Amino acid sequence: MIRKIILLTLLTVSIFAQEIVKDKDARVGIYEQLGNKVALDTKFTTQDGVTKTLKELMNGRATIVSLNYYKCPGICTAQFAAVASLVDRLDVPLDEYQVLTISIEPQDTPALAKEKKDTFYDSLILKANLPQDKWEFLVADQKAITDFTKSVGYEYIKQVNKDGVIDYLHAGTLVIISPSGIITRYIYGTSYSHFDVKLALVEADEGRVSATRVQALDLCFAYDAEAKKYVFQWEKIVGGTLFFGVVLFFLYLTITGRKEK
């Protein structure tokens, strides 16, 4: 009877383990490149149609980068709103940081980027205090997009439905980059603590690389491609619990077996 219980438990754990591996094989998510340097000569075009290098856009400042696309029907809208709230209330001198939103869709145009920027600038409570060039909405060709996303470890999947509508499976995150182009921090999700971002900017300004906070949450949440949102991965928690349960059970059998001998 005990052997049957053990075998059943191990089988259940293996099923959950396969599910976790399957998630990783999908290659949608963030594969951190902390301490690496982005290519500052990569060129992007602003919402005003001006082409600049990343170095010019950063302007020697610690920079917050979000990766989105402007026709996104999913988490991008929530992330745009979160970034708007962030820059609206961030307690950091305006001349000490820069915000860049980079589209991962090469067909996005400066006009579309401007439309999106105007929408969220109009939502700012303190917009009079935020210069237009503080938060730039950028587009680029596929090579520039690929070069940048690869350098920061941002993996996504492009999908085209039967009607030719383009959609992307992608994660929500902010990438913090130092003035010299070093990746110093990732901040996950679509809502952000003003304190965490302020601290990340201070660290970036000093060139200090910081380990991602609450990294364990990545094991509990995953991006649901169909729902286009982050969902709690209960099977991972159950799988982990069962695994530790099996370990404890074997320890119990070992200890009691020795006592009986």
Image (tube, rainbow, N blue to C red):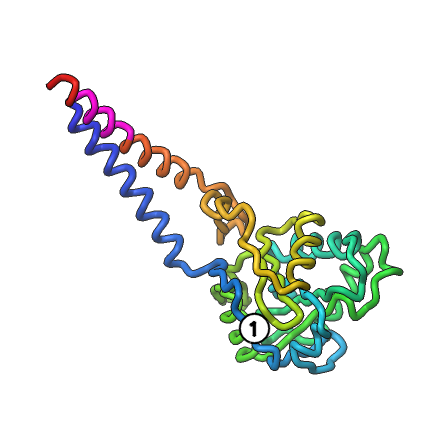
Q: Which residues are magenta?
A: 248-257
Is any atom of residue 159 visible in this view?
Answer: no
Quadrant in the picture for residue 206? bottom right
Q: Is residue 108 above or below residue 217?
A: below
Give x and y (percent) for residue 138. 67, 72
Quadrant in the picture for residue 14? top left
Give x and y (percent) for residue 11. 24, 38
Name which residue lies at 15% across and 28% down: 3
Label 1: state its secondary structure.
loop
Is any atom of residue 225 visible in this view?
Answer: yes
Name which residue lies at 58% across and 62% down: 184
Q: Main secondary structure of the magenta part?
A: helix
Q: Quadrant of the C terminus?
A: top left
Is 250 inside the magenta-drawn segment?
yes
Q: Quadrant of the N terminus?
A: top left
Give x and y (percent) for residue 225. 49, 54
Q: Which residue is mark 1?
A: 38
Q: Is residue 144 above or below residue 11?
A: below
Observer-nearest of 228 and 89:
89
Q: Is residue 56 above or below residue 130?
A: below
Instruction: Name the kind of residue labelled 1 in the image.
Output: Val
93 relative to 3 in the view: left or right: right
Q: How many marks?
A: 1
44 relative to 162 in the view: left or right: right
Name which residue lies at 48% across and 64% down: 155
238 relative to 106 in the view: left or right: left
Is 164 inside the magenta-drawn segment?
no
